[in-house]
Image (tube, helix red, strand yellow):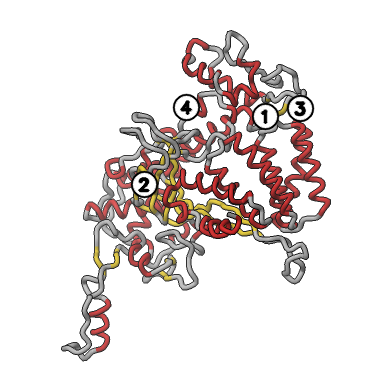
Amino acid sequence: MTSEYDIPQASLIHSEEPYAAIILKHSRESHCHYCFSVLPADAVPCMSCSIPMYCSQNCQLQASGQTYGKCPSNIYINGNHSNNLEEYVMEITSGGDVVDQKLEFIPEHKHECQGVNWPAVLPTDIVLAGRVVMKSMAQKGHFKEIPNILETLGLSQCYSKMPSESKLELHLYSIVLLFCLKFSYCSELLTNEFSISQIIILLSQIRVNSMRIVHMKSSDVFGLQDQFGKLLPSEPALTSSMEQVRVGQAIYKTGCLFNHSCLPNIHAYFLSRTLLIRTTEFVAAGCPLEFSYGPQVGQWDCKDRLKFLQDEYFFQCKCAGCSEVNASDLVINGFCCIDPNCSGVVLNSHAVYCENQKLKISEPSSINPLLQVRMLNDVNVKKVAHLSLGKKNNWFHIKSGYCLECDSYHDLESSIEAANKAWIHIRRLRDSTVSREIDTATISDALRSLGLLRSTLHAYNKGVAEAEDNLAQAFCLLGDLKSAQNHCRASIKILEKLYGPSHIVIGHELVKLSSIEQALDNCSAVDSIKQLRSIFSQYYGSHADAVFPYLKFLNKESCSHT
């Protein structure tokens, strides 16, 4: 997918309903099985099997292949009506123009509620494949033979790249699914080699093309409580954070055509089950439109991103983030220089190998000169690797254990051992935060460990940001919001170096910071709220309030500060 013309930042470029979708097993009791919204107290069950739960009768009807129509506009009380009250009620409430049968509203669950329980037993992607098969046959108008899946969906498949064990698993599941469909719904369905092969192809397509539907959830945190459930005397105020919740899995025929990049220029999100894609930066005409399949620069280092994409999607990523040197990959797991006045980074052997592979040191003639010039002019890279850029006729040169700024040697073995010891206390604090059983000794140990990490790891190492965030959460629970604010700001400062100041991850962190600042009645909350609203508008446009209802609360609370 490429842009045909210049596209401004925050432009909505695509919107699509799923070809087929299904709720994930862990969300079956908490979310609507059709629109994936949180279930209300008066949830509506499936009319046939009562297993799926829906948030409304509208979702129940759409899942059954129907959609609301219009009720009669004029109903006359005085008139010639049937003497049978039951017949009269059915005539009014179930008239032909009340429910409208349409092909695009093909029943997605009907074949699963015929007195059997196989959809609850089989893995989610297998059940999703069943829904794709049933819809494709319904569109063809017959249920005797499975259509050609490659022609129906037109998606790539990864069967030839899969290991033998995974291929065997697909063969077994395809046979099981075929017989489940035949004996529970389509008695005429042919169970031959062609049908089995089509399901195998479909499963391999779902493996690399299906999307996880993600909704945002606001988590509110109060302070510690005593044994009677009352807040401790410190009475800490409410703080909030945002988290992504995976609720469903779906196939979007057009959405699947967008390629991956670890430095994406578009962002995918969901309203109900609708996929929306929006540009996060200006995209010039002819440029690829790419979003992230999971890992991004700033989230993981290059080595872990490459491994994930190879294992999950069977391709070697060659995006800009994985083929060009960037400051984030240099510092995300880097160590600091032994000279306290030097800002250079020291890399371990794994990071060195990955960075050298980017530039193919052994074949300098193969490097694009324009790429090398762009890299040499990267201010962020120069801050942590200035000396290395000047060596060997300006070709980038990296050695494990040596500072990329001043070339000082750092004993990484002892530093790694020290960092591992420090992480013991940080993890203990994190566990205490989850169980809400924090004492001063745990806090003190974690603070000392943070100091050790800062003296060992690079100032922009992501581990330091995570340690700062853990301490911020702990101080929130203890009611020490001023300390929580300081540690939250320290974490955000590092993340801005790894992701960039306008990344959506920074927006999520600013939700935490702004809620702490509001609890402190701090006027700086206004600036934090303005920044996070700017980021959310960049990623979600006019849908920002719909995706993040918490923004409305922030708007109201910030009025008094303004």
Q: CA distance from mark 4 to mark 2?
A: 24 Å
**Mark 2 packing: few (<14 Cα in 10 Å), some, or many (20+)?**
many
Identified by mark 2, the residue type is Tyr
Q: Which residue is mark 1?
A: 334
Foreground mark, 1 or 2? 1
Compare marks 1 and 3 and give the one earlier in the sequence.
1
Disc ID at residue 457: none
**Residue at image coords 51%, 44%:** 535
Q: Which residue is mark 3?
A: 413
Q: Which residue is mark 2?
A: 252
Q: CA distance from mark 1 to mark 2?
A: 39 Å
**Mark 3 packing: few (<14 Cα in 10 Å), some, or many (20+)?**
few
Measured as percent of width and height from the top left, residue 53 is found at 44, 66
Compare marks 3 and 4 and give the one earlier in the sequence.
4
**Residue at image coords 38%, 52%:** 274
Identified by mark 4, the residue type is Lys
Compare marks 1 and 2 and give the one earlier in the sequence.
2
**Residue at image coords 78%, 41%:** 449
Identified by mark 1, the residue type is Gly
Measured as percent of width and height from the top left, residue 551 is found at 52, 55
Secondary structure found at label 3? helix
Compare marks 3 and 2 and give the one earlier in the sequence.
2
Identified by mark 3, the residue type is Glu
Secondary structure found at label 1? loop
Q: Are marks 1 and 2 in contact (CB under 8 Å)?
A: no
In which quadrant will I find the C terminus? bottom right
Q: Which residue is mark 4?
A: 318
**Residue at image coords 47%, 16%:** 370
Question: Which quadrant of the structure image shows residue 160?
Answer: top left
Question: Which quadrant of the structure image shows residue 279?
Answer: top left
Q: Is residue 138 rendered to the left or right of residue 320?
A: left
